[in-house]
Image (spheres, grey):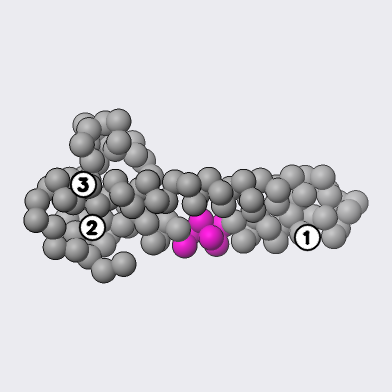
Amino acid sequence: MPALEPESDADTIAEFQRRKREFQPRWNRNFLIFALPGFVLFAVGGPLEKPLSLAGMGLFLVAVVRGACYIFRYRRCPVCAGLQLPAWHSPYRSCGGCGARLSWGWKDST
């Protein structure tokens, strides 16, 4: 996604929060559909059931790749397009690249 030219801090914060709201359901769905079943298949298969273990590893790798794609697409600063990895920020989130404010306060600063 290209960087935007925001009119104010409020527009920047609103755009980042909108992207974060789009990201979270996709991230959760990716975990429930690919990562968790992959982990379970790998654990159940163990060393005795090689096809189950391979299927589990495959599903989990798909989840990792999809998760990385989601992070690179949705977790970017609207101003400079710098990657924003999930972390707690206090009192509010700001971009490490350009310093733009990305949250209203500590409740939405992850």
Question: Would residue 17 appear left or right of 68 to someone viewing this image?
Answer: left
* Label 1 vs label 3, nearer the camera: 3
SS under mark 1: helix
Q: x and y percent of residue 6 in the render? A: 13, 57
Q: Which mark is residue 54?
A: 1
Q: Earlier in the sequence, mark 3 or mark 2?
A: 3
Q: Quadrant where the C terminus lies?
A: top left
Residue 62's quadrant in the figure? bottom right
Residue receiving disc 2: 78
Quickly name the residue at label 3.
13
The residue that appears at 64% across and 51% down in the rendered structure is 33
Can residue 85 be seen at all in this image of the molecule?
no
Stretch in magenta: 64-69
Element on which disc 3 rests:
helix
Query: Which residue appears at 21% of the width and 46% of the height?
Result: 13
Q: Amino acid at mark 1?
A: Leu
